[in-house]
Amino acid sequence: MAEVITDVRINQNAADALDAAIAEWLGVNRTDVICLDILARLGTVPAGRLAEESRLTTGAITAVIGKWSDG
């Protein structure tokens, strides 16, 4: 079990590093990358579903969507 936990941690660290690199490359923050990934997987979804999938509050999703639509 300890080996599995170690492997999961290594995988999570690699995923975090990839998310950070993608965010930097796109010029967005990591929350944006998470939301963009969800939209790439699911297509167009209502804001509430995006909040659920991203585990963000509806207020946070409103801010993300507002930022995208402003610029």
Image (cartoon, rainbow, N blue to C red):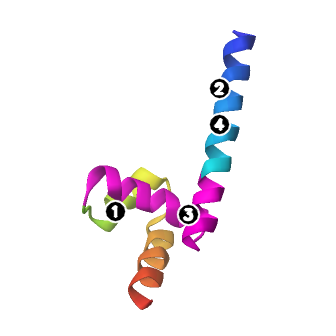
Q: Choose between 22 and 68: the one closer to the eye.
A: 22
Which span is picked out in magenta?
19-43
Give coordinates of residue 59: x percent, y percent. Answer: 48, 73
Give coordinates of residue 9: x percent, y percent. Answer: 70, 30
Which label number is shown at residue 48?
1
Q: Which of marks 1 and 2 is in front?
A: 2
| Residue 24 among those drawn in magenta | yes
Q: Residue at x 51, y 61 (%)?
A: 33
Quadrant of residue 27 in the image?
bottom right
Q: What amino acid type should be assigned to the residue bearing mark 4?
A: Gln
Q: In this view, does 43 lie to the left or right of 39?
A: left
Q: Mark 4 points at which residue?
A: 12
Is label 3 in a helix, a strand or a loop?
A: helix
Q: What amino acid type should be assigned to the residue bearing mark 1?
A: Gly
Is label 1 in a helix, a strand or a loop?
A: helix
- Badge 1: residue crowd in 10 Å (few <14, some 14–19, many ≥20): some
Q: Mark 3 points at which residue?
A: 31
Quadrant of residue 58 in the image?
bottom left
Give coordinates of residue 1: x percent, y percent. Answer: 69, 9
- Marks 1 and 3, how far apart in space? 16 Å
Q: In this view, does 43 lie to the left or right of 64?
A: left
Q: Which residue is drawn at 61% across and 42% down?
A: 15
- Marks 3 and 2, how far apart in space? 22 Å
